[in-house]
Image (spheres, grey):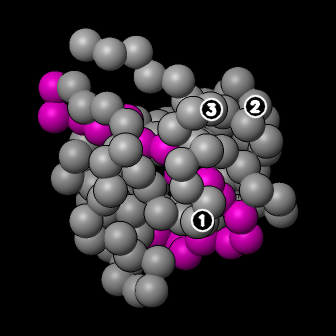
Amino acid sequence: MEKVNLADKLSLFHDHWNPHVVGELNGQQLKLVKFQGEFVWHHHEQEDEMFLVVKGSFQMEFRERTVEMKEGEFIVVPRGVEHRPVAAEEVHVMLFEPASVLNTGNVQNELTVPELNKI
């Protein structure tokens, strides 16, 4: 039962699109990730995902619309919904999702991170 300082944890890594686990509860993981550029279009068959913007801003693209995400805002992407995060500049994001979630969902490519680092 230790407190977590998000800024401290975010200072421990500099790569993009590589989630790092910072906490776990009830089969869910809290992950920190830095985005920059375009991610891959994907969806998750069984899991919902929550994206909370810690610092910066990004766009969550859906096939039918785009949602501008700003610092202090979050969005829940329901299972099965195709989406793609896009960040013109580096953004810091906290993810809340089941431990079973693969970052690229139904897609396997060079951005897929099969084993997450815990920091």
Would you call the spot at circle 1 few (<14 residues within 10 Å), some (14-19), or many (20 or more)? Answer: some
Amino acid type for the residue under numbered disc 1: His
Q: Which mark is residue 24?
A: none
Name the residue rendered at 37%, 44% in the picture.
Answer: 119
**Residue where numbered disc 1 is placed:** 16
Q: CA distance from mark 1 to mark 2?
A: 18 Å
Magenta region includes residue 33: yes
Circle 2 sits in a helix, a strand or a loop, which is it? loop
Position of 51 relative to 79 (above/below): above
In the image shown, does 41 or 95 lie closer to the viewer? 95
Circle 1 sits in a helix, a strand or a loop, which is it? loop
Name the residue rendered at 44%, 22% in the picture.
Answer: 4
Q: Name the N-terminal-most of marks 2 and 3.
A: 3
Position of 116 relative to 76 (above/below): below
Q: Quadrant of residue 15?
A: bottom right
Amino acid type for the residue under numbered disc 2: Glu
As drawn, the residue found furthest toward the bottom would be: 109
In the image shown, does 108 or 42 lie closer to the viewer? 108
Position of 14 relative to 93 (above/below): below
**Residue where numbered disc 3 is placed:** 7
Q: Quadrant of the N terminus?
A: top left
Image-based side of 45 in relation to 104, left or right: left
**Residue where numbered disc 2 is placed:** 71
Circle 3 sits in a helix, a strand or a loop, which is it? helix
Would you call the spot at circle 3 few (<14 residues within 10 Å), some (14-19), or many (20 or more)? Answer: few
Magenta region, residue range: 26-43
Name the residue rendered at 32%, 56% in the picture.
Answer: 117
Where is residue 90 drawn, in percent x and y?
76, 56
Q: Nearer the viewer, mark 2 or mark 3?
A: 3
Q: CA distance from mark 3 to mark 1?
A: 16 Å
Q: Nearer the viewer, mark 3 or mark 1?
A: 3
Label 1 with label 2: CB-CB less than 8 Å: no
